[in-house]
Image (tube, rainbow, N blue to C red):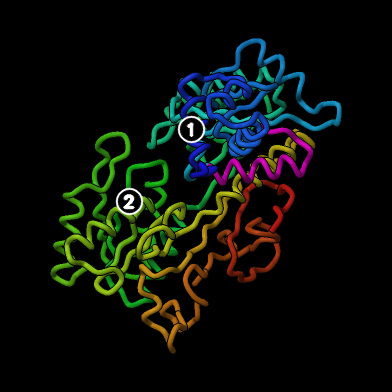
Amino acid sequence: MRESVERRHRRILRVVRERESVRVGELAALLGVSVETARRDVAALAAVGRVRRLHGTVTWPTAPLNARDARLARRSAPRAAGGPVLGMVVPVSDYYFRAVVQGARQAAADAGARLLVGVTDYSADRDLQHVATLLAAGADGLLLTPSWSVDGPTREEAARFAEPPLPTVLVERRIPLGVPGAQLDRVVSDHACGAALAVRHLARLGHRRVALLARHTHTRAAVRTGYLSAVQALDLPDDDLSPPPNGPWGHPDDSARERLLALIGTGEVRAALVHTDIDALNLLQWLTAHGVRVPDDFALVCHNDETAALADVPLTSVSPATFAVGEAAVRLLLRRFEDPDAAHSAVEWLPRLVVRDSCGAGRKADGPGRKTDGSGRRTGGPGREADGSGRKTDASGRETDGPGRKTDRPARETDGPARKTDGAKSPPRPAS
C-alpha cells in the first residue's frame, strides 16, 4: 500500500527532530524515496515553518544555525533583486500559528521578500537565541511572538525587546502600557470581540445564561473580558466556570465539567462558550458520555477554529483572522522600512463567527434545511457566517477606510472581519 504524503511528512519531522540536521540525500535514503520526492516534501514543510531548509540540509526550526549555515543563509538572501530578508520567531508552527506563518509568507513573497522562520516551542530562552541567529543570517527586520508567560511579560522581559536592533513588529503579543516597548508596532486578534460575538449569538437564540470555560492561555484574559462585557450589556449572569490557572495551561477539568453538568441538570444553563476548540471538542464527547445531547439539550460555541469542523457535531466557532494577521504584520514591517519615522501602529483584526450545528441555530429554521441565526437571518447552511464582525470605530464613531483601519470618515456597517489601528498612517490594505 502506497504511503500517504501526510504519513511521510510525519516521518520526516520525526527524523529531523531527532537529528536536528540531516542532508536531503540522506533523508531520502532513510525514507526509501527518491531525492526529488524528499526535496518536494521538505519544501512543503519548510513553507509553513515546520523545518528549515538551507543548501541541501534540513534542520529542525528550533535548532540554532551554526556559523557556516548562518553565512550561507546570508549569502542566499535575495539582495541582488533588492528584496529584504524578514526574520520571524513564533512559539509553534502548527495549530493557531500555522495560518499566521502562511499569511506572512504569502505577503513576503508578494513583496519580493524572503521570510526566515524560527520556532521556540514556548521557550523564552530561545527567543533571544533565534533573534541572534536571524541577525547573523542577514535579517533586515523582525516579526516576533515572544514566549512570555500567559500573564504577559515582566518589566525585565519586555525590556529585552523594547529597543530592538532592527525594525520589529510584535505578532499576537502586546506589551502593557507603561512598560518599555509598549510603543512597538503590533498586529493582534481582538479575541475579546470574538467572545462577545459568541455570547450575543447565543443570546439571540434565546439563552439567558451562558457558561464560560476557558483554558489558561495567552488568549484567556481577552476572552474573559469579551464574555464579561457581553453578559453585562445583555443583563445576563456571570457564569464563568473556568478552572483556576493550575499548571501551565489550566485545562477545563472534571470539577468544572461537573459544575456545568449540575447546572445543565437543573435547566439553569443550556449554553456555553469554550476556549479552546480542542477543549470544546473534548467537552462535547464528555457531555455525550453523560447523556447530554448537543445541540438538542445544550448549545456549544468554541473560541478558535482549527479543529472545530472535525467534531462529530461540527462546532460553531469564533474564527480569528490568523492568515490576515500574518499578512498585516509583514506589510506593517515593510512600511517601517519605507518610512522609519512613521507613527507606530497597533493593528487589530476582528474575528468572525462560523455557525455550524453545535449551537442549534438550524433548529430555528423557517423551512426545511433553511438555517437561521435565531434572529431570522439565514446562514445558508453549515459553516456560513451568521453575524460576522463589523468594522471597529473609536469613541467618536469614526469608522474604517479599509478592513478595520480607523479614519475620519463617517461610520459604515459591514459584515466582514476587520482591523483597527491607532497609528497616524496605516499600512497597505491586505488582499481580500
- From the viewer's perspective, is 71 left or right of 346? right
Q: Residues within 10 Å of mark 2 (few under 14, many from 20)?
A: some
Name the dominant secondary structure of the magenta segment.
helix
| Residue 154 can be seen, yes or no | yes
Residue shown at the point (56%, 46%) measured from the top left: 99
Q: Which mark is residue 11?
A: 1
| 2 or 1: mark nearer the eye | 1
Residue highlighted by disc 2:
279
Residue 310 pos. (x, y %):
41, 58
- For badge 1, the amino acid type reads Arg
Residue 225 pos. (x, y %):
38, 53
- From the viewer's perspective, is 30 left or right of 267? right
Residue 387 pos. (x, y %):
50, 71
Which mark sits nearer the N-terminus, 2 or 1? 1
| Residue 159 can be seen, yes or no | no
Work out whether 405 lies above or below 108. below
- For badge 2, the amino acid type reads Asp
Q: Nearer the viewer, residue 263 or 56?
A: 56
Judged from this view, the residue extending furthest toward the bottom is: 367
Q: Quadrant of residue 45?
A: top right
Q: Is residue 209 magenta?
A: no
Spatial CA span between label 2 and label 1? 27 Å
Mark 2 and 1 residues: CB-CB less than 8 Å, in contact? no
Residue 370 pos. (x, y %):
47, 83
Q: In this picture, which residue range is highlighted in magenta?
A: 98-115
